[in-house]
Image (cartoon, rainbow, N blue to C red):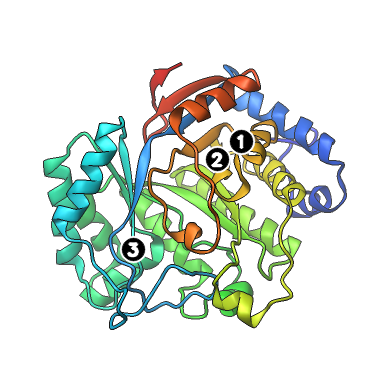
Amino acid sequence: MSALNNRRMTVDEAIELIEKADLKTLGRMASEMKAKLHPKKTTTFVVDRNINYTNICWVDCKFCAFYTHEKKEDAYILTFDEIDEKIEELLAIGGTQILFQGGVHPKLEIEWYEDLVEHIAQKYPQVTIHGFSSIEIDYIAKRSKISISEVLARLQAKGLSSIPGAGAEILSDRVRDIIAPKKHDKDQWLEVHRQAHKLGVKSTATMMYGTVETTRELVEHLDYVRTLQDETGGFRAFIMWSYQSDHTQLKRELPTISKTTPNQYLRYLAVARLFLDNVPNIQSSWVTQGSYIGQMALKFGANDLGSTMMEENVVSAAGAANTMNQDEMIELIRDIGENPAKRNTAYEILERF
């Protein structure tokens, strides 16, 4: 249990905190909660690489500037040799994880994904494969005429370790119908993660805020995550970032959407730490917020800096251009009196500094 008088925070209480609480008070409350969950003051990070195996996608999310269509000049599917080269570069800097995501390719079926995962798992057994968003898994199932559970089980058998939370955006069908009308609904996102957790495939939960959601819809998103976590215990972490608008269709359609502020980010993050009392780790989104606010996030409930992000193509296509290496992360963590540590995908400590 968390936050208010030793009982679990309600949706209405979370909304009131976001809309009315003093920012310093929120930071103090979130820091107290973080200290209960992580009393050793360890802040972690992972050295990994995002590999976008294809940029071809039929889902046409209005907030995305990365995707293209199959017959466009810039369309690609990486070869296994190209993927191997990226993994070799990751291993050379001590990386342990690849985050595999693509567009949702209209023609690739389960056998192609099995071959891909098996190839990497056999050639690079020291690398953890954290891959494939819920919409990718859902579409592989539909395209291959099999169940979501079978897709997950077959990929797990080939070497898939865990799945990312991408595709959650805001778990509100009203919002999703505006920003990503072809994407599956909130219940299907939750169901993919439920099925993964049943098979022992852990995942992360995410949120992209800053488009057309209300405060209530944002907090209801947290409530869906908390409820599923009560049921399965399968979420390792929660990761939240702000909508990046450059070059997106959504910006062209709704140019009046206001830019999010650091105050909003820290406010939402603190309430997420208080509300998600059953999710052990909260990640700082320095990639979209920059290193200074990324560091401030550690004072507002985050206990993990996420990835050194050797390669990132999706949010950078929409205008985010922040970078940070391992040494910079270590210094940033030490600067606020916490203890830096490199972790793996399962949040197990590999090295302390």
Most foreground residue, 41 or 88: 88
Amino acid marked by disc 1? Ala
Type of amino acid at the residue the image marks with label 3: Gly
Residue 47 falls in image quadrant: top left
Q: Residues within 10 Å of mark 3 (few under 14, many from 20)?
A: many
Image coordinates of residue 209 in percent, x first then y, are: 64, 60
Q: Is residue 253 visible?
A: yes
- Residue at 63% x, 82% y is 253
The reply to whether discs 3 and 2 touch (Cβ–Cβ < 8 Å) is no
Residue 302 numbered tag: 1
- CA gap, disc 1 to disc 2? 5 Å
Closest to the observer, 232 or 92: 92
Q: Residues within 10 Å of mark 2 (few under 14, many from 20)?
A: many
Query: How far apart, in angstroms, are the residues tagged by discs 3 and 1?
Result: 27 Å
The one nearer the camera, 51 or 139, is 51
Residue labelled with disc 2: 283
Q: Earlier in the sequence, mark 3 or mark 1?
A: 3
Percent of width and height locating residue 186: 52, 68
Contact? badges 1 and 2 (CB < 8 Å): yes
The structure residue drawn at horizontal position 64% and vertical position 17%, both measured from the top left corner, is: 337
The image position of residue 311, as x and y in percent, is 38, 48
Q: Earlier in the sequence, mark 1 or mark 2?
A: 2
- In this rendering, is residue 167 above or below 304? below
**Amino acid under disc 2:** Gln
Task: For residue 159, say whether it is visible.
Answer: no
Describe the element under mark 3 as helix, strand or loop.
loop
Please give the name of the residue rendered at 58% of the width and 20% of the height, measured from the top-left corner.
334
How far apart are the two marked residues, 3 and 2, measured between alpha carbons?
Answer: 22 Å
